[in-house]
Amino acid sequence: MTLALTEAWRRVVASGGLPAPGPGGAESPPVQVERPANPEHGDFASSLAMKLARPYRRPPLAIAEAIANELLKGSTSPAAAGRSGLIESVEVAPPGFINVRLSDSALEQTIDRVLAEPATWGTVQVPNPQHVNVEFVSANPTGPLHIGNARGAFVGDLLARVLTAAGHQVTREYYFNDFNAQVRNLGASVLAVRAGEPIPQDGYHGDYVGDLAREVPPEVLAEAAASDDPGGRIGLWASERVRAGIEDSLERLGVHFDLWKTEGSLHREGWVARAVERLRAGGYVYEQGGATWFRSTAFGDDKDRVIYRSNGEPTYFASDIGYVTEKFSRGFDHLIYVWGADHHGTVARVRNAAEAMGYDKAAVEMILIAWVRFVREGREISMSKRSGEFITLDDLLDEVGVDAARWFFGSRGHTTGIDFDIELAKKQSAENPVYYVQYAHARIASILRKGTERGLTHAPSMAGALGGEPEAVLARAVARFPEVVEDAAAAEETQGVTAYATELATTFHGFYRDARVLEPDEPERSARRLALVAATRITIANALGLLGISAPESM
RNA sequence: GUCCCCGUAGCUCAGUGGACAGAGCAGCGGUUUUCUAAACCGCGGGUCGCAGGUUCGAAUCCUGCCGGGGACGCCA
């Protein structure tokens, strides 16, 4: 549509109706097309004429008329035969909107296409597909995932799904720390429980520590006893055990990772050292006070950042820059980090380092998700792995269910802080809008089953068969799906998808009220309505699938 | 003190330059001999935190202020 408008504009210019854009002439604003909320305004609307009014110094209505005429001509001219008949009407409305209405024929072709290729309906191919790395969760394996990790898990997963649907190549990655003091503290805590001693300071207190203590295999204990770092040895075993548990929890959420990357491997494989050398070669590294620094201020940061401490130990930042080079070495065009908002302070230094190493800074993106404040009966639940006071992700799923939890996080922007009242969530899980959408799907599935029982089948083609008002309304709603996916991928947000799924369900429920599908006495009407609701079912199922939510056949 | 995010209906949140600001839940009233009532229909509900500014047009962009959260480490 955007393309058609742009062409129409160009034709007006070519025919001398308007001056050419560019140097000496008017600047060209981006051609924007939107979906009007009011059906009276057609299927597409553009404010192009109003944008052009100022540079052209002409009334927007006159410009709109000229473009609208070309648009209508173009859609019926032999040259545009491939798209002919898709546009029903083009209207101009004050103060200068151009409103375009799709023809029945366009809607009929869409329904046929959905039924012909259901699996790909809603996937699109963006013109500039990229290799995208999405790193998320990345919680250290010192305890089970808790509900504080839930939002990151869902946001990252949904983002990866949406980008994939838009045609990008996506790798999902989990990064964790396997060799620092935290892991040693975990090991020391396990040993303390075994010895019946109090948990050391900075140790871990959760029930799972006791479980780990009971499960340590004898050979690991023997190795630890013989080692000069028993806590470290036990910690290594414990963290691997915990990590496997995390993977199980995530699989239960429907969240799958392509790669689990350890901080230790970045050092062992030399990525960190090479990255530092690269920075040094560019003159961005210096030594001071026995420590090695990155000149982050050269890129606008408010202070320089330590890479190696004065005791020679690398900082977390050192691993970060090593990881950037490691990721780019795998051919990614775009790195996305899904981080908690508390990591805000580290964003600038990592992006600056990427720039210093010669990468495109814009290709390194951090998505900061706001905290979820967990509340039970009005009191905030403090969450700390060390204290052992937390609600695990598994507990949350037991209480509210995967589909409801996915919908909850998928329908909210990630920059907004959320209050999550556990009791309220449990109560509301029964009336979560997700069931409204799933119900629409189950209702259609039921109709399709009954139709088969009664020997009714859907029409092989909708061509010329769309029929009246209720059909066209539903078909319009179905046809919008690919744009929703495209918008979601571009915005890196999924609220549009949940909103769309709700709207489509509402539209279907209205159709169900007004239009009876199974009418054995009127096989033709039944056939075209069956085709239409079958396409609707596919669309709902694909929208839910995009969110990782199930589409039940019955409820 | 500096920086980032947020402030929209009673509640939880959408809407980030367009046409009368929306949804779900909560509240009130109605609908079933029919393909699933987890549905449908109707009603009430708003100084879009406040004040300026830019624009043909602002919840949306800019400035200031108020309120809430977060970050400012040779922690991770």
Image: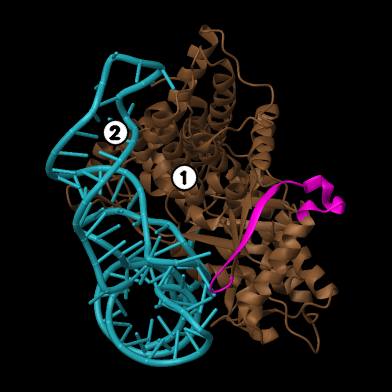
Chain colours: A brown, B cyan
The segment highlighted magenta reads: A75-96
Can you tell which of label 2 and label 1 is closer to the viewer?
A: 1
Q: Position of residue A426 (x, y in %)?
A: 26, 37
Q: Amino acid at mark 2?
A: Ala
> Which quadrant holds the N terminus of chain A?
bottom right
Disc 1: CA contacts within 10 A as few (<14), some (14-19) or many (>=20) = many
Q: Position of residue A385 (x, y in %)?
A: 35, 48
Q: Which residue is mark 2?
A: A430
Disc 2: CA contacts within 10 A as few (<14), some (14-19) or many (>=20) = few
Q: CA distance from mark 2 to mark 1?
A: 17 Å
Q: Does the magenta run of residues contain A88?
A: yes
Furthest residue to the right? A79
Q: Is residue A479 left or right of residue A139?
A: right
At a point 75% along the width and 80% down the height, the residue shown is A283
**Chain under numbered label 1:** A
> Which quadrant holds the C terminus of chain A?
top left
Q: Which residue is mark 1?
A: A498
At a point 86% along the width and 50% down the height, the residue shown is A78
Q: Are marks 2 and 1 on the same chain?
A: yes
**Chain under numbered label 2:** A
Q: Is residue A543 left or right of residue A426?
A: right
Q: Position of residue A515 (x, y in %)?
A: 45, 28
Q: Is residue A229 above or below residue A505?
A: below
Mark 1 secondary-structure assignment: helix
Of A421 and A290, the residue lying toward us: A421
Q: Is residue B60 left or right of residue A33?
A: left
Q: How many marks?
A: 2
Name the N-terminal-most of marks 2 and 1. 2
Of A344 and A503, the residue lying toward us: A503
Q: Is residue B46 above or below residue A289?
A: above
